[in-house]
Image: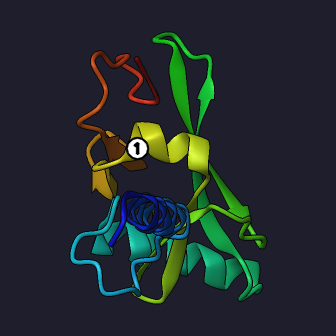
Amino acid sequence: MNRSSTNLSLLYKLRTFYNDCLNFNINTNMQEPPIIFTDSAALKVGSLLKDEKNSDLNLRVYVTGGGCAGFQYGFSFDENKEDGDTTVIKQGVSLIVDPMSIQYLMGAEIDFQEDLQGARFVIKNPNANTTCSCGSSFS
């Protein structure tokens, strides 16, 4: 193999890897999901989706600028999956994250907790350097 074909082969492999990263789906043969979507969170989302009576809805988790610590988390129901969205499926429920937000949420855990403080979705994010006491913003 000459140097030119070796470089082309390497470029092809890098492009394939990049495309695989953009289109990551937990249903592929990869071992660990980029985000941990707990059973508790998936079951609660499934219950909420049942109330909405729209089987096309997914839970979208995203990061926006703002909040007391610089960034804040957001949750919404979304019928659309965009190109490049990361999808994690648990208990038949799809969690989707846009390409910008996945940078900040890689390795995070999305959970649902019910305790004396009430019922809420909680994000445990190993990438957050500081968090606000409200629990919904970070830097």
Residue drawn where x is 39% and y is 86% of the image: 28
In the image, taking residue 90 as reference, residue 58 lies left or right, namely right
The quadrant in which the C terminus is found is top left
Estimate the x, y position of residue 69 in percent, counting from the top left.
Answer: 45, 11
- Residue in the foreground of this view, choosing between 49 and 81: 81
- Residue in the foreground of this view, choosing between 1 and 59: 1
Q: With respect to residue 60, does 132 lie above or below?
A: above
The residue identified by callout 1 is: 105
Residue drawn where x is 52% and y is 22% of the image: 71
Estimate the x, y position of residue 135 in percent, counting from the top left.
Answer: 38, 28
Corner quadrant of residue 53: bottom right
Judging from the image, what secondary structure is the residue with disc 1 in? Answer: helix
Estimate the x, y position of residue 123 in percent, counting from the top left.
Answer: 36, 44
* Amino acid identity at mark 1: Leu
Residue 119 seen in the figure: no
In the image, taking residue 93 as reference, residue 77 lies left or right, namely right
Q: With respect to residue 41, does 91 lie above or below?
A: below
- Residue in the foreground of this view, choosing between 131 and 22: 22
Corner quadrant of residue 57: bottom right
Estimate the x, y position of residue 104 in percent, counting from the top left.
Answer: 43, 36
The quadrant in which the N terminus is found is bottom left
Residue 88 seen in the figure: yes
- Residue in the foreground of this view, choosing between 3 and 93: 3
Residue drawn where x is 30% and y is 87% of the image: 29
What is the basis of the colouring in this image?
rainbow
Residue drawn where x is 54% and y is 61% of the image: 22
How busy is the neighbourhood of tag 1: few (under 14 within 10 Å), some, or many (20 plus)?
many
How many numbered circles are shown? 1
Q: With respect to residue 37, does 56 lie above or below?
A: below
